[in-house]
Image (spheres, grey):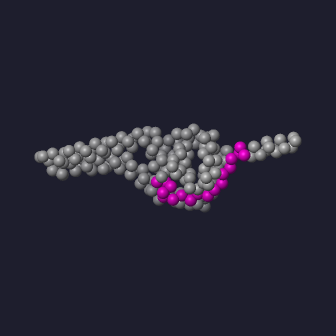
Amino acid sequence: MARIGTLAIIALALRLRTRLNFTCAYNSDDWTKAYKTYSGRGRRRFLNLLYAAVGTLMLLFGFVVATTAKNHLSDGLPLFLLGIFWFYMAHGMWLNLGRRMFKGRPELQQQFAVSVDDNRVIFVGPISCSEWSWPAFVGFVEGKSNFLLLLSPFAFVVFPKRIFSSQQVEQFRELLRQKLPAR
């Protein structure tokens, strides 16, 4: 009877120690979606909404200037161009930033062996490897297609959800909740 109790305690201890192992090969879409997730939170979200509002106002004002009786389309053109620029700042910049980040960094284009446990996160690839203990992260963000582990307000590690099985997604989410504050 005591032996069954001991085995149950050992089994519980092994279950509490979460260890996930998988491979991850990023693609451009992973980084585009990661930057979209990153831009949709906190101050960046407010700035994106502000930029979109400024872009809308510029386009409307350009339309009004271009359609008044004494003005021509060329009078409103600078305002149209400024409106388009502000819309780009609100949305397009983040998408292009993800693509450029992926394209310009060869270490992101390799296949990684990833290990995540109660103590650390490890990425090992043929040309680079990275290891972080949990206190290195300041929080996490969960998007529709990814998890971002924040190293600072301006740096993050991407975990695309496509690399997890459905059971691993739940295990990873629970581990993040235990180790990090959501942002």
The percent coordinates of residue 16 (x first, y second) are 71, 43
Query: What residue sits 35% from the left and 50% below the top?
Result: 88
* Residue 55 appears in the rendering: yes
Relative to 109, is 60 above or below? above
The number of callouts visible is: 0
The percent coordinates of residue 60 (x first, y second) are 25, 44
Relative to 63, is 181 above or below? above
Please say whether residue 29 is one of the residues in the magenta stretch. Answer: yes
The percent coordinates of residue 95 (x first, y second) are 42, 53
Query: What residue sits 48% from the left and 58% below the top?
Result: 28
The percent coordinates of residue 166 (x first, y second) are 61, 52
* Residue 150 appears in the rendering: no
Magenta-tinted stretch: 15-32
Q: Is residue 130 left or right of residue 36?
A: right
Q: Residue furthest front?
A: 1
**Residue placed most toward the observer, 14 or 170:** 170
Looking at the figure, which quarter contains the N terminus?
A: top right
Please say whether residue 171 is one of the residues in the magenta stretch. Answer: no
**Residue placed most toward the observer, 3 or 35:** 3
**Residue placed most toward the observer, 152 or 37:** 37
Query: What residue sits 45% from the left and 45% below the top?
Result: 39
Query: What residue sits 34% from the left and 44% below the top?
Result: 52
